[in-house]
Amino acid sequence: MTGGRVELRGMTWDHPRGYEPLVAASRQYADAFGVEIVWDRRSLQAFADAPLTGLARSHDLVVLDHPHVGRIAVDGCLLPLPFPDPQDSAGVSIGGSLESYVRDGSLWAYPIDAACQMAVRRAEYSGPVLTEWDRLAVGDPGSDIRMVTPLLPVDSCCLLMSLVASSGEVTLPRSEKEFVSARNGIRALEIIKSLYRAGPSEAVGWNPVRVLELLACSDEFDYSPCLFGYINYARDGFRPNRLIYVDVPVFRGMDMSRTILGGAGIGVSAATAHPEAATAFARWLSSEPVQSGIYLESEGQPAHRQTWLKAASDPRYAGFLDGGRRTLETAWTRPCDPWFLGFIDDLCDIFPSFLVRDRSEEGFLAAINRIYRHHCGLRSQS
């Protein structure tokens, strides 16, 4: 505290969507309430999988990915936050964003950014897009569509779960011995391998931002069927080519996709010297007036449902908020049990070999289930 003014330090992630709205909103908050917030950044990969315990010791506020809440509930590195008024909770966040930060009856972060895996095309492209996953499951690489999919290991893991959930298998893990069923797991792996064959082999090392940059800055590709969406690329002038988000393919006989929910929430460190000030800022940042105002206007990707509805017809944002809303409304929430992030880390270590070495789907699924059993503390069964 300096001269009666409270100073807070926050940690976010290193992309304009991750830091520009926070910096702009913090400046507005300081002018209005006399609370200064300084923001540090970490990489997208660290945002996804780095432990939060150390960050919570050095920061008052932490922007986090919701799968961390299982570990947070165990180690207590963040403070439980007041729930929104029950009368307002249905309209507070889009899809399952708010619920994804609840664990053991406590709310560990307020949703400020909503995302899921979506399909996207270049605005000027009017050719075919993929409408059914089944086409890829039978080995058709979609050669009539210039498409590319980010297959960095963590994105491949997310795509696997999105495909399984979109098949109707929404309860994961399936059992104590199987993370996914053989039928849906093998079909999902067949599709991922077809996507790998349809795009450049280098995509095994590409994340969503790399693919969005390719779509937005070159004419090499026209379409991506499944990646985590970024609102920035749907805005005129952000990059040379404007992008439009569209429905993700579905499986034949299914009326909707269930792609994996992403986004970000803001939590308050249990070690902060200013819990009331930090909590007040977090709640303010997630409120509709802020989400619909300075947050959205400063490269932010809002989580508030009313912002999505109000701004869906605004040409500056419609390519994302209107084009991606159906997919986000039906997005699927991945597990947040304490074992889950370690399981994903180990799965990421072996996923490239499935694609690059052309391992069999059956053998790779068996490896997935062995890793799952290990992380659940069960004896591996070969």
Image: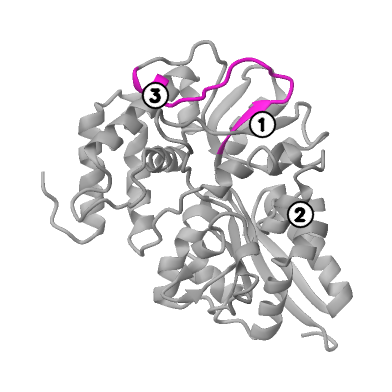
The disc label shown at residue 134, or none: 3
Give the residues drawn in magenta, as a range. 118-138
**Going by the image, does 338 lie left or right of 207?**
left
- Label 1 CA crowd tier, 10 Å (few <14, some 14–19, many 20+): some
The disc label shown at residue 151, or none: none
Q: In this view, does 353 lie above or below 125?
A: below
Which residue position holds label 1?
Answer: 213
Of all residues, the one furthest to the top in this rendering is 144
The residue lying at 57 percent from left, 49 percent from top is 329
Q: Which amino acid does label 3 sit on?
A: Asp
**Going by the image, does 91 lie left or right of 185?**
right
Q: In this view, does 54 lie above or below 126?
A: below
| Sequence order check, earlier mark of 1 and 3 | 3
Question: Under tag 1, what secondary structure?
Answer: helix
Which residue position holds label 2?
Answer: 20
| Residue 109 located within the stretch drawn in magenta | no
Question: In which quadrant is the N terminus drawn?
Answer: bottom right
Q: What residue type is labelled 1?
A: Glu
Residue 206 in the image, given as x and y percentages of width and height: 52, 33
| Sequence order check, earlier mark of 2 and 3 | 2
| Residue 136 located within the stretch drawn in magenta | yes
**Going by the image, does 326 lie left or right of 27?**
left
Of residues 382 and 66, the one nearer the viewer is 66
The residue lying at 61 percent from left, 82 percent from top is 272
Measured in 3D between alpha carbons, the distance from the residue under mark 1 to the one under mark 3, in whole angstroms, is 28 Å
- Label 3 CA crowd tier, 10 Å (few <14, some 14–19, many 20+): some
Q: What residue type is labelled 2?
A: Glu
